[in-house]
Each structure stands twice: as C-alpha cells, then as structure tokens.
Image: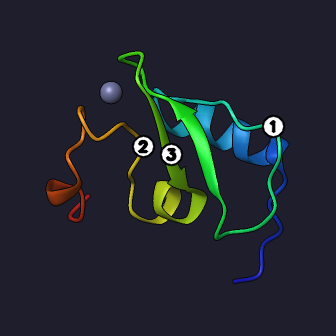
Amino acid sequence: MNKQWSIDKIKQYVEKNSDSQLLSTEYRGFSQKLEFKCACGNDFEKTFTKFKNKNQTKCDVCQPPKVTETL
Ligand SMILES: [Zn+2]
C-alpha cells in the first residue's frame, strides 16, 4: 500500500474515525509521531500507522496499550 497521506487527509480521518483530535500540523511520513488530543482531554503521541491500523485512537489512559490489539 502506497497511499499518500497529507496532514489534511489525516485530520479528516481522525475526525471521522475517532473521538480524538489531531493537534499536529505537519506530516512527514509514517514513522513520525503525531500529536493527538483524546476525548478525555489528554494529549498523546502516536504514529498514524498505529492509530489507523491498530485502532489506537485514544490516549493510554482511556485505551491502555495492552488491550488494543483485537479491534
Ligand atoms: Zn483519554
């Protein structure tokens, strides 16, 4: 998969597919950590790959890292 993501597309994706908001204003590649704001108010960092492919769309408090894999 070689889909090109831009910060605007990512922002739309985040708004459609999660309760979180994207805080980052720049996207430089899949390995970059982006800043998000969780619905609970916490800020968290995650690569977009994890956010999208592993459904890690919340902060570690709302969605502890251990239990995320099966969605
Ligand atoms: Zn949270």
Q: Amino acid at mark 1?
A: Thr
Q: Which amino acid lies under the numbered mark 3 shown in the image of this protein?
A: Glu
Question: SS class of the residue under badge 1?
Answer: loop
Question: Which element carries disc 3, helix, strand or loop?
Answer: strand
Q: Is residue 5 above or below residue 63?
A: below
Of callouts 2 and 1, which one flags the residue occurring earlier in the amino acid sequence? 1
Looking at the figure, which quarter contains the N terminus? bottom right
Alpha-carbon distance for marks 1 and 3?
Answer: 13 Å
Name the residue carrying label 3.
45
Residue 8 lies, in percent from the top left, at 83, 41
Kindly report the distance in space between the C-alpha atoms of the residues bearing marks 2 and 3.
10 Å
Residue ID for mark 2: 57
Q: Is residue 9 left or right of residue 48?
A: right
Where is residue 68 drawn, in percent x and y? 23, 56
Q: Secondary structure at mark 2?
A: loop
Q: Earlier in the sequence, mark 1 or mark 3?
A: 1
